[in-house]
Image: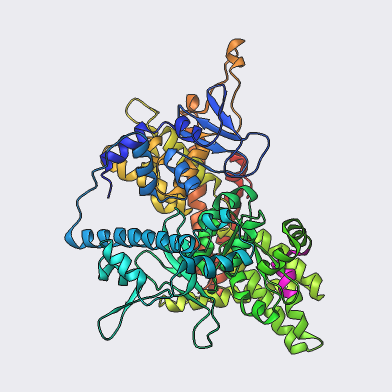
Amino acid sequence: MIPQDTVNQILQAADIGEVVGEFVTLKRRGANLIACCPFHNEKTPSFSVSPAKGIYKCFGCGKGGDSVRFVMDLEGLSYPDALKWLAKKYNIEIKEKEFTDSELAAQNERESLFIVSEFADNFFRDYLLNSSEGQSVGASYFIERGFSKPVMERFHLGFAPDGRDLFYKTATQAGFSQEVLEKAGLVSKKDDNTYLDRFRGRVVFPIHNVAGKTIAFGARILKTDAKAPKYINSPETEIYHKSKIVYGIYQAKNAIRQKENCFLVEGYTDVISLHQAGIENVVASSGTSLTVEQIRLIGRFTDNITVLYDGDSAGIKASLRGIDLILEEGLNVKAVVFPEGDDPDSYIRKVGGEAFTRYVEQNQKDFIRFKTEISLEDVGQDAVKKAELVESLVLSITKVPNPVKRQIFYQEVAKLLNIDEAILINEGNKKTVTNLKSVAKQDGGQVAPKRNIEMEILSQEDHPEEEALVRDLVLYGQVQISEAHVLADYIFSETEADIVQDPVLNAIYRQYYEFYSRGEAPTTRYFISHPDHRIQEKVIQWETPKHELSQHWKKYEIFIPEYQDNLGENITRINFRIALLKIKKEISQVIEELNFVDEEKEVILLEHLKEKLAERKEIAEFLGSVL
């Protein structure tokens, strides 16, 4: 663990202009620096760097952060690794906190696994290039598939010798222990206490993590052997969890950002063939069922996924669950099916990169149309099957977190299947209620939400008053509003953390209060450099208004008062914001209570709810909020 004083030293030394300037060309514009955004394609610069505040913000794609976040996002590093990257740049020595014996053993084992995996990567590559077996068997296979030397080097393709234990002997002679080799999944111990290479007589596809470190291997057999599996892969290890990684993410991450889309395929050769043809924003699930962790990994680089399916209807139907998972994570998903008998690898080798891209553009469909058309092939005129299809489509739509998108998808299904949209929405609400009951039952509670739609509307609301309140706290909390008090004193005397419902805003509120209760005051810099990117992005958004007053106003002696200059007068608005937040909390409580009362009590509660809604409207109108 990096000590906090060292973290502070790194944050102070890391000049945002210098760090960003290593990757993009910055130009001066007033007090800031601008460039075309490195995270998405654009021709007109919308990426702004503020040296004074130590932050960057793209007004095109919304990315923002400090030096650490920039390195994390661009290089795909973890927070500690990004700190180490900056420490190395600024020659800051990191003396990590001493570990306990168990922590040290785990840390050493993890590091050993990375080292031995890199050794194996180099061994397989060297054997491919410099042995007669590697050249005649392994290289011949790759060349036959049309892979060039540069693309083979980019993916570190290799070959495992056909002998029993050549790798094992080479590795132990190099100083690696039998225990480490076995834990890395590179060898296996036999009953006679001898060791056998896991990968033998196969072409090897190293698997890299986001930072480019080798963590595992996949290997394909080339000989005809009915008893041997076509592919074998590394087992799960301390550094490799197959459900959390997608093949090719390290090689594809920059292209995914630039194209603002990720092609998702099934196998290693699909990925490499597309790269060979110049299509680099592609990763593979490597034959495993798509997982939430894999989707979230892709989601770090884009909100858009296009699934490229083989022309095999049975396989497509089996993998539709993956689309529901993508939707549940809030990403946009499209799908493309290739002609029967083709997969992305064979199709691109047949038609070339340009024709492949054209085919994808012309045949990609949003998930609703895709799932409907695929499923209708089996439905025909069968009413029961059609009802099952409708139920399945509605279930998929309920996975979508965004209510506007859900509405659009309901409309599309209604048109495709000639069904009343209201019926679909009603069915969706029933499924949502059923899910809520299931969750509540698992938690040991009970729920009977009669007014699920109203509750959903409230839960989907923006939180403008909450945001304004917490923003004032962070930006102006230490501004004097009277002789004895600062703004933070007033806000904390009138509110409690549970009044702020939005989870990110609530976290900011609570962390500020932790400082406040110790008699301290967190600076905006604390939040701007926060490890939680949601908190960081929110505060940077407050610190970087898209439009700023021109300095020319001062030239003509026209002075526009800024918000903080009239903070005392703005207390009235803050008062109303707090009142509005309290009313919203009461409304939520009333609606929740309505789920469990009889009809007589329900009438009273509804009258109370009506009064509170009227109060909310009146205050919101004064504040200029839209409900």
Q: Is residue 198 left or right of residue 401?
A: left
Residue 521 in sight in this render: no
Q: How many marks?
A: 0
Q: Give 598 or 107, whichever is nearer the viewer.
A: 107
Residue 157 in sight in this render: yes
Colouring used for the render? rainbow
Q: Position of residue 224 (x, y in %)?
A: 55, 83
Q: Quadrant of residue 482?
A: top left
Q: Is residue 365 magenta?
A: yes
> In this view, which residue lies farthest toward the front?
132
Q: Position of residue 399 (x, y in %)?
A: 60, 69
Q: Is residue 434 magenta?
A: no
Q: Position of residue 553 (x, y in %)?
A: 61, 16
Q: Is residue 353 left or right of residue 94?
A: right
Q: Position of residue 187 (x, y in %)?
A: 34, 74
State whether residue 395 is above or below residue 252.
below
Q: Quadrant of residue 63?
A: top right
Residue at image coords 82%, 75%: 418
Q: Which residues are magenta?
A: 363-372
Q: Give 331 or 138, whichever is nearer the viewer.
A: 138
Q: Quadrant of residue 401?
A: bottom right
> In this view, which residue lies farthest toward the top?
556
Of helix, strand and loop, which mostly describes the magenta segment?
Answer: helix
Residue at image coords 31%, 37%: 8
Q: Give 275 or 605, whichever is nearer the viewer.
A: 275
State whether residue 445 is above or below residue 106.
below
